[in-house]
Amino acid sequence: MAVSDRSGSARLVPSARSLLVGLVLVALAAGAYVFARDTSAFAVRSIEVEGATPALAVQVRQALRPLVGTSLIGLDGAGLERRVDALPAIVRTDYDRAFPHTIRVRVVPERAVAVLRTGKTAWLVSARGRLIASVPLVDQALLPRLWEPASLRPVAGGFLAAGAGGVAARSVGLAARFPVRVRTASFAGGQLVFRLRTGLELRLGEATDIRLKLAVARRALHVLPADAAFLDVSVPGRPVAGKQNSQVSSRG
């Protein structure tokens, strides 16, 4: 039995020839990798962008232009994502290598929900409260306006602070399917207020349970008095509507 055990063990030990062949294969693979990485065999020649508008796709390609000519094999994927995610209009990015010469980039763009007005400038703002880009004062007429002091200094790609348009922008983003368009939104003194295009003032109170409050407001719109000037849903279970100087329960 002892002899059998030793012979069995011997059969499991690789021979010198097998070890040599293995080392040669590893060396060849490493050499092939270095060759492919350091030559133009798999150099980036084109960048395909999915999920973006034509204008945004141009921005993405410009951001990735330094990668053209580099090797797909040695591509720094984390660096690529950082380059694209730094664009103010991008939420997140992922990519694929499409051999032999293409990078395929998929992006999730920011969703513009409002226009920030501060002084003589106007900025497109996303549902996350991010400043996407400056726009002409008369542009994007259908988007709600957020009015902030001229002392505010917007920076493309930056995020608005809670009390400087951030809460208002994120709240407006939740009102995309509200049946009446929002003209302006403000958050001051801890109170969120939408001014609708019909002239109605929608008071949402604290910036909590926004979806619930909007759902209550949507139903209350059907039973509002014709002369109602405001609808207060700050307490969702007790919506209140009335003229500016009075408060009458919308449910009688």
Image: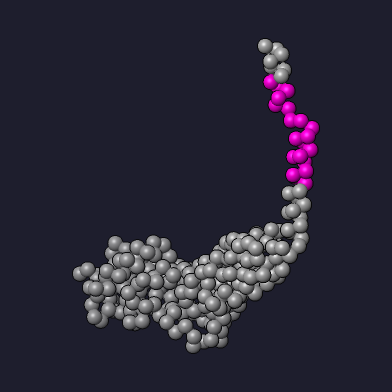
**Residue 40 magenta-drawn?**
no
**Residue 11 in view of the camera:** yes
- Measured as percent of width and height from the top left, residue 141 is found at 44, 84
Q: Residue at x 27, y 76 (%)?
A: 242
Identify which residue, 87 or 96, lies in the foreground. Answer: 96
Outermost residue on the bottom side: it is: 138
Quarter of the image for residue 151 reads bottom right
Outermost residue to the front? 17
Residue 159 placement, left or right of 209: right
Q: What's the residue at 33%, 79% (across, down)?
A: 200
Q: Residue at x 36, y 71 (%)?
A: 177
Name the quarter where the N terminus is drawn. top right
Residue 15 lies within the magenta run: yes
State whether residue 215 is above or below residue 144: above
Q: Which residue shows up at 76% across the image and 48% down it?
A: 28
What residue span does the magenta drawing correspond to? 8-27
**Which residue is more in the foreground, 210 or 109?**
109
Residue 180, x across and y down, in percent: 33, 77
- Locate residue 247: give its quadrant: bottom left
Q: Main secondary structure of the magenta part?
A: helix
